[in-house]
Amino acid sequence: MAAEIEKKRHHHGDLREALIEAGVGLLREGGRSALTLRRCAARAAVSHSAPAHYFKGLDGLLTAIAARGYRTFAATMIAERALAGADPKARLMAICDGYLMFAREHAALFGLMFSADDIGFEDPELLRESAAAYQVLSECCAPFRHGSAGSKGTEVMIWSLVHGFAMLSHKARAGDGHPVKDIRFADLMPGLTLRSAAPGKTNTK
């Protein structure tokens, strides 16, 4: 009887979505410690056994939540990029702003996405969504001249800078006197040179 009621309440495809959304909400409200399979099931208004049909334990649910996080993460950066116009430097700065905005507004989810302890990085959905998010960074780094490490070197440099700043900013919000507290990320961005710049021109502004 309970299974029949559950089947009527949710279509086969959206029960999984409901459990993921429930998990995102619990994570946002109470952090990682608040997220359990039973609590997700309760919030999604399904039986406590329902998550087992869609996820291999809590790690499976956490991995699906992280994949959803990467999708939102990419969408946030893309939305900021769309507001920046055509200038390559403005577009790169815009996706960094989107990166920091996401990290600030979804702190617990952001932490989960980069946690080696809780999620399965070999999961196909997670790989697809995280690769799409990285592609946003890669595309915005492409117009610039690269150093000896090539295009990947430029991408990793910018990624390291923005991700490190996001992590340090999170710590800065926890107390006064942190070195990052009065620093603007824009002031840390390196002066990159466009690949199309004429020989002899630095074009760093």
Image (spheres, rainbow, N blue to C red):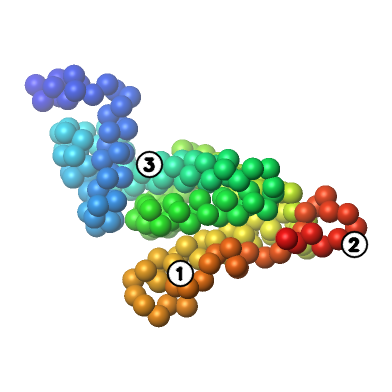
Distance (Cα) linking label 1 and label 3: 26 Å
First in sequence, mark 3 or 2: give its number.
3
- Kindly state the secondary structure of the residue where label 1 is placed: helix
The correct choice, above or below, for 45 with respect to 122 in the image is above
- Circle 2 is placed at which residue position? 200
Give above or below for 67 relative to 111: above
Other-residue count near label 3 (Cα within 10 Å), few / some / many at <14 / 14–19 / ≥20: many
Quarter occupied by the C terminus: bottom right
Q: Are marks 2 and 1 in contact (CB under 8 Å)?
A: no
- The residues tagged by marks 2 and 1 sit, at their Cα atoms, a distance apart of 37 Å
Disc count in the image?
3
Front-most of 84 and 71?
Answer: 84
Q: Position of residue 154 (x, y in %)?
A: 69, 58
Describe residue 142's horizontal placement relative to residue 187 as left or right: right
Which numbered disc, 1 or 3, marks the residue closer to the eye? 1
Looking at the image, which residue is at 9% across and 21% down? 1
The residue at the point 58 percent across, 40 percent down is 82
User: x and y percent of residue 126 in the render?
Assistant: 46, 42
Query: Does residue 200 appear to the left or right of 99 in the view shown?
Result: right
Q: On the image, numbered disc 3 is attached to which residue?
A: 64
Q: Amino acid at mark 3?
A: Ala
Specify the amino acid type for callout 2: Gly
Mark 1 sits on what residue? 168
